[in-house]
């Protein structure tokens, strides 16, 4: 969800050529699967396409390649540190840490509350973009 919300915000700001935005899993449960159907529907309802996206595993090269690594929760942070051998360049942060209410993004996989996740992701992406700009 966050990948496509961020891409949409960046496009609306006319900055798409300035950013490379991608998401990757820190676990293996969903590798190769398309975007989860309720998320795909929600994005579509907001006019945001996620066509062609399939889950892939984050790897150590991602850490070197990207300037900023944004996680949704503390479990993602732990997994990123394990995959990447730590965070020596201090690139890793949680999405909501860019907002006035730092914390973890609500995980709809467990709660079933996609609206809460949408709110968290949208607020976090808006704050992240504002921080970068």
Image (cartoon, grey):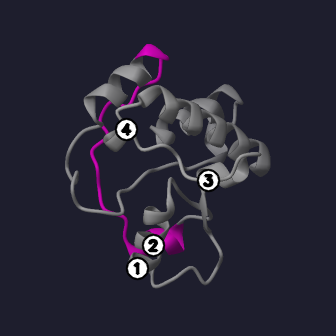
Residue 18 on image: x %, y %:
66, 46
Left or right relative to 35: residue 87? right
Disc 2, SS: helix
Which label belongs to residue 103?
A: 3
For label 2, the residue is 78
Which label belongs to residue 42?
A: none
Q: Quadrant of residue 127?
A: top right
Residue furthest to the front in view is: 111
Q: Earlier in the sequence, mark 4 or mark 2?
A: 2
Q: Which residues are magenta?
A: 45-65
Disc 4, SS: helix
Above or below, 26 against 81 in this view is above
For label 4, the residue is 111
Magenta region, mostly helix, strand or loop? Answer: loop
**Front label number (3 vs 1):** 3
For label 1, the residue is 82
Mark 2 crowd level (few <14, some 14–19, many ≥20, 10 Å Cα) = some
Q: Residue at x 50, y 63 (%)?
A: 74
Q: Residue at x 45, y 85 (%)?
A: 85
Q: Earlier in the sequence, mark 3 or mark 1?
A: 1
Residue 7 on image: x %, y %:
55, 36
The residue closer to the viewer here, 65 or 72, is 72
**Front label number (2 vs 1):** 2
Disc 3, SS: loop
Left or right relative to 127: residue 82? left
Residue 65 on image: x %, y %:
52, 68
Measured Cα–Cα span from mark 4 to mark 1: 26 Å
Above or below, 21 against 28 in this view is above
Q: Are marks 2 and 1 in contact (CB under 8 Å)?
A: yes
Measured Cα–Cα span from mark 2 to mark 3: 15 Å
Q: Are marks 4 and 2 in contact (CB under 8 Å)?
A: no
């Amino acid at each position: 969800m966050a990948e496509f919300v961020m891409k949409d915000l960046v496009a609306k700001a006319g900055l798409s050529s300035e950013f490379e935005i991608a998401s990757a899993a820190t676990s293996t449960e969903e590798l190769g699967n398309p975007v989860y159907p309720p998320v795909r529907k929600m994005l579509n309802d907001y006019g945001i396409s996620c066509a062609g996206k399939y889950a892939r595993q984050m790897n150590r090269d991602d850490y070197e390649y990207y300037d900023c690594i944004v996680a949704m929760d503390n479990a993602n942070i732990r997994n990123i540190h394990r995959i990447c051998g730590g965070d020596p360049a201090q690139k890793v942060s949680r999405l909501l840490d860019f907002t006035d209410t730092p914390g973890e993004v609500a995980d709809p996989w467990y709660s079933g509350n996609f609206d809460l996740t949408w709110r968290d992701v949208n607020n976090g992406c808006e704050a992240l973009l504002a921080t970068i700009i």
